[in-house]
Image (cartoon, rainbow, N blue to C red):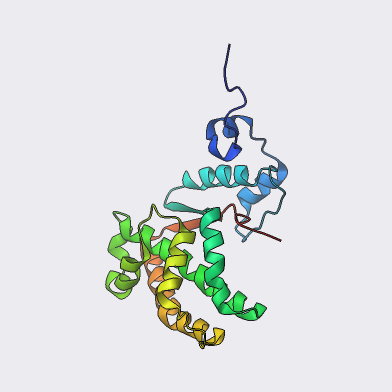
Amino acid sequence: MKGNVLGDIRAEHDAKMLEASFWQTTDYKALLESYDRCIVVGRRGTGKSALVHMLSKHWHAKPKTHVMTISPIEEQIIGLRDVVSLFGENYLHIKAGSKLAWRYAIYMELLSEIASHYRMKNDLDYKSVEKHLLSWGAKRQNISGKIRKKLISILDTGKDVKPATRISDLSDNFELDLLEEVLFEAISKSNHQFVIFADRLDEGYTP
């Protein structure tokens, strides 16, 4: 008698079963060959996380290629929503503030990866981004939680502060142009590439 023949209750947690039963469709093969920024939309259980797993495994096997997977945690996203509310109710303000936050987060995750790599760290201008790296948090911490803590440390929660002022404060503190310059220089010098996957983006979502 064989137990647990169907694997773990959640497919995302059962890589062995996923790889054994995964069907390489034409859509999957098209994603393998694509260098575009692709967005996969589907209902729960249609295999979005399976795609992320198999694609990340494919790219991870390539030389000088680093794979980064972003998977927000539901509880952290719910908490992050409260912080984002400081940008007000105007859609453009919310969009601008959220875009700045996620752009900063992705840059920091990439810089953290480079700073901890035994070879690539030699190509990193560490001094220029030292304060950002020290305040960002450990690699083992979830990205959504780190974004939330960073926003709380920067944003003025006073009732008299306008959302536009908070967005301006974010832009000044994040120094995105500097981070991008240091990041591009390090990747170019090391001749490595990064492939980024974002999964479970519907966590904490309420219509």
**Which residue is located at x 55 percent, y 60 percent?**
77
**Which residue is located at x 52 percent, y 71 percent?**
83
* Residue sitting nearer the eye, 195 or 201: 201
Q: Could you tell whether 95 is left or right of 135 in the image? A: right
Q: Quadrant of the C terminus?
A: bottom right
* Residue sitting nearer the eye, 145 or 117: 145
How many numbered discs, if any? 0
Q: Could you tell whether 166 is left or right of 29 in the image? A: left
Q: Quadrant of the N terminus?
A: top right
**Residue 174 shows in the view:** no
Give the image location of residue 98, x and y in percent.
Answer: 56, 72
**Residue 200 shows in the view:** yes
**Which residue is located at x 56 percent, y 54 percent?**
74
Give the image location of residue 79, x and y in percent.
Answer: 52, 62
Work out which residue is located at the far front of the displayed protein and give it. 159
Give the image location of residue 149, x and y in percent.
Answer: 42, 66
